[in-house]
Image (tube, helix red, strand yellow):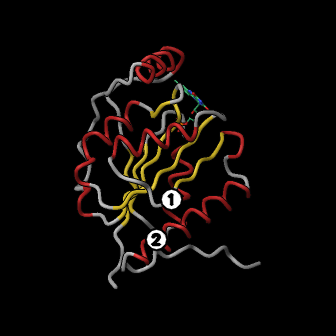
Amino acid sequence: MREIRTLVVYYSRSGHTRAVAEEIARTLGGAEVEEIRDTVDRAGLRGYWRSFRDAMRKRTTALVNPGRNVGDYDLVVVGGPVWVGAPSSPVRTWLIAHAGELHAVAFFLTHGGSARDRVFGSLAALSGRSPLAVVSVRERELGTPEAGARIAAFADEVRVRMSAAGLRPVKTEKAPVG
Ligand SMILES: Cc1cc2nc3c(=O)[nH]c(=O)nc-3n(C[C@H](O)[C@H](O)[C@H](O)COP(=O)(O)O)c2cc1C
C-alpha cells in the first residue's frame, strides 16, 4: 500500500472553519492545507450582506489563486461555513473549478445551527462525488471536547474508507498521554 496524499481545502470568513480545518489536518496526521482566498472584501457588516446575497443567489466569485494541482491528491477534504442554508460562494466556486480533478472527497462545515444536511448535499452535487465522511461543528462547539471527538471519528472513518480502497491508512494523531 502506498501513502495517501491528503489536502485539506477550506474557506473561512471569520476564522471558525480555519480552526476546524487545522484540527482536521493535524488529526489526519499532517495533511497539507490550502486556504481558498476570495478577491471580494467580505469584512464587516457590508461584507456580511454581500455574502448573504451571493449565497442566496448561488453566485460564484473570483478566487485569488488557482491553487495546487488538486488531481495530485488521493483525498481532498473540503470545508467552509454555511451561508443562508447554502455553501459559501468561495467554496461553491472552488468546487465547480476543481470537480473534474477530484478523486476521493470528504466534507466539513461550520455553522450556527441550521441547514447542515442540505449543504452537505449541495457540496456533493457541486463536486459530483459522494463524500467518504462528513463532519460539522456549530459555532458554540468550537474547541470543545465534543467537537474534537467528532473530528477524531471523522478521521477514523476516512482512514477506514481509504484503507478499504487499498491506500495506506491515514495516520490519526494520538492525544498526548497524561
Ligand atoms: C452571510 C452568512 C450567512 C449565514 N447563514 C447561516 C445559516 O443559514 N445557517 C447557519 O447555521 N449559520 C449561518 N451563518 C453562520 C456561519 O455559518 C458560521 O458563523 C460559520 O461558523 C462561519 O465560519 P467562518 O468563521 O469560517 O467564516 C451565516 C454566516 C454568514 C456570514
**Horizontal side of residue 147 vs 3, given as left or right:** right
Going by the picture, which residue comes out furthest to the bottom? 1
Residue 135's place in the image compared with 177, above or below, is above
Q: Which residue is mark 1?
A: 133
* Residue 71, horizontal then vertical, whole percent: 23, 59
| Number of marks in picture | 2
* Residue 90, horizontal then vertical, whole percent: 37, 34
Say whether disc 1 or disc 2 marks the residue closer to the N-terminus: 1
Q: Which residue is mark 2?
A: 161
Badge 1 marks a residue whose secondary structure is loop
Question: Measuring 23% from the left and 43% from the top, which residue is drawn there?
Answer: 66
Tell me the quadrant of the picture where the N terminus can be found. bottom left
**Horizontal side of residue 37 vs 65, given as left or right:** right
* Residue 95, horizontal then vertical, whole percent: 32, 42
Residue 49's place in the image compared with 127, above or below, is above
Question: Measuring 42% from the left and 72% from the top, which residue is drawn there?
Answer: 162
Callout 1, which amino acid? Ala
Instruction: State which image quarter holds ligand 1.
Output: top right
Residue 148 image-quadrant placement:
bottom right
| Label 1 Cα crowd, 10 Å radius (few <14 / some 14-19 / many 20+) | some
Towards the viewer: 40 or 102:
102
Question: Measuring 61% from the left and 65% from the top, which residue is drawn there?
Answer: 152
Tell me the quadrant of the picture where the C terminus can be found. bottom right
**Horizontal side of residue 163 vs 134, given as left or right:** left
Residue 84's place in the image compared with 125, above or below, is above
The label shown at residue 28 is: none
